[in-house]
Amino acid sequence: MVAEVSPEPTPRPPRRKRRRLLILTLVISLVANAFLLATRGGPRVGQWRSVSARETYLAAYREVMAGMPAAQEWDVATSWGTVHATLFPGPEGSTKTPILLLPGWGAGIPMWRDLLPVLTRERPVYAVDALGDAGLSNQSVPLKAPDANAGWISETLTAIGAPPVHVVGHSFGGWLATDFALRHPEQTVSLSLFDPVQTFSSLKWEVYLLAIPASIPLLPQSWRDAALARIGGNETIDHNDPLARMIDAGTKGYSSARDLPPRFTDTQLGSLGIPVYVAMAGNSSILSDPPDAVRRAEKLVPEVEASLWEGATHSLPLEEPEKAGATVLDFMNRHEHP
């Protein structure tokens, strides 16, 4: 009998290379969403472009979540739709204030895959899929009212019985986190922001220009590739990574209905009454002036620790999860709920 020889597995790029490819995918998703939301007209609800697009996305989503065991999951009915929320357990018997994670556009709960193990060493962690975006949440009402985004977050936390939380947001999730803290300080213990968009700095104008070919699926792939190379470098998506596949599938297959928010005013930032940590990426391909964003945060926010992470890209919590996690945990430990 001749023994069967298994084919050699497709080699995966080194971990650092895979992380660069994942970061590129996140940047592509953010840029595409920013362009589409800035140019669409009228309030509506997010929806999948096809059944097959949703199935492709969900297959990758579930593959990532299989490695992120949750203690509990909810599908919470809010005034704007059903929000999918999860609780990841911290140390047994921990009495520390939990964390709430708010993702960047197009990323969802799975984007926290690498940061989550660092955070749960010390604290329980809640995470949600944002309404009006790709994920397991299902929007049913337009997010038209000024308090709509903060509203669905607040209603979700109340429904699942969460106490006041340390809120962490990345990218547009940073804007969501800041908006929530401004409108619901009673549910917010502290605020930690990773390269937040439309918070202390505006988007680069090039983002909108390059997003035109990057975000239109019907254009020739060569046009899309050229635009994406300008945005994120001459890399391609690592289809061996289910998180990269998920984000790519959501970018292509989901028509978002979240508004591109205005940048917070000086008055709004000055009214933040909780401790705030801000990490701006020195090499952000999205934001117009990271050093100025740090200066603006330090000038306006009453209780703030702001820093410029030299050499970091917009996706810094994925790029350096150990450093990012340790930094915000130290900040939270120094600003624990009374």
Image (cartoon, helix red, strand yellow):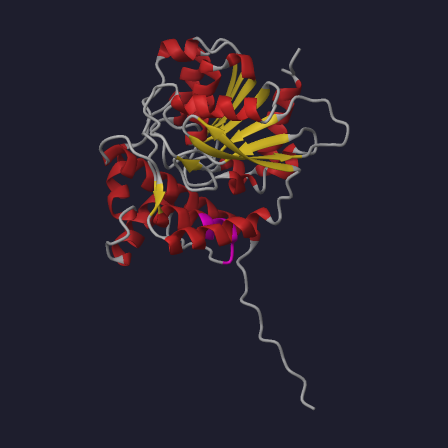
Query: The N terminus lies in which quarter of the figure?
Result: bottom right
- Rendered location of residue 318, percent (x, y): 52, 40
Q: Is residue 167 visible?
A: no
Residue sitting at x 67%, y 89%? 2
Task: Count how many numbered circles sit on residues in the image.
Answer: 0
> Residue 278's spot in the image, x, y percent?
49, 22
In this view of the protein, which residue sits in the foreground, 226 or 25? 25
Residue occupying the far right of the picture: 93
Residue 24, position in %: x, y?
42, 46
Q: Residue at x 66, y 20 (%)?
A: 333
- Identify the residue at image location x=39%, y=23%: 148
93 is within the stretch colored magenta = no
Q: Does the magenta segment cover residue 244? A: yes
For the question of whether residue 45 can be seen, the reply is yes
* Image location (x, y in percent) of residue 83: 48, 33
Taking 2 as reference, is 192 left or right? left
Q: Quadrant of residue 14?
A: bottom right
**Residue at point 25% right, 54% down?**
218
Residue extent of the magenta highlight: 240-246
Asked if residue 49 lies left or right of residue 114, the reply is: left
On the rendered image, what quadrant is the C terminus found in? top right
Chief secondary structure of the magenta portion: helix
Q: Nearer the viewer, residue 45 or 267?
A: 45
Q: Is residue 287 left or right of residue 182?
A: left
Look at the picture and state if 242 lies above or below 334.
below
Q: Is residue 263 above or below residue 136?
A: above
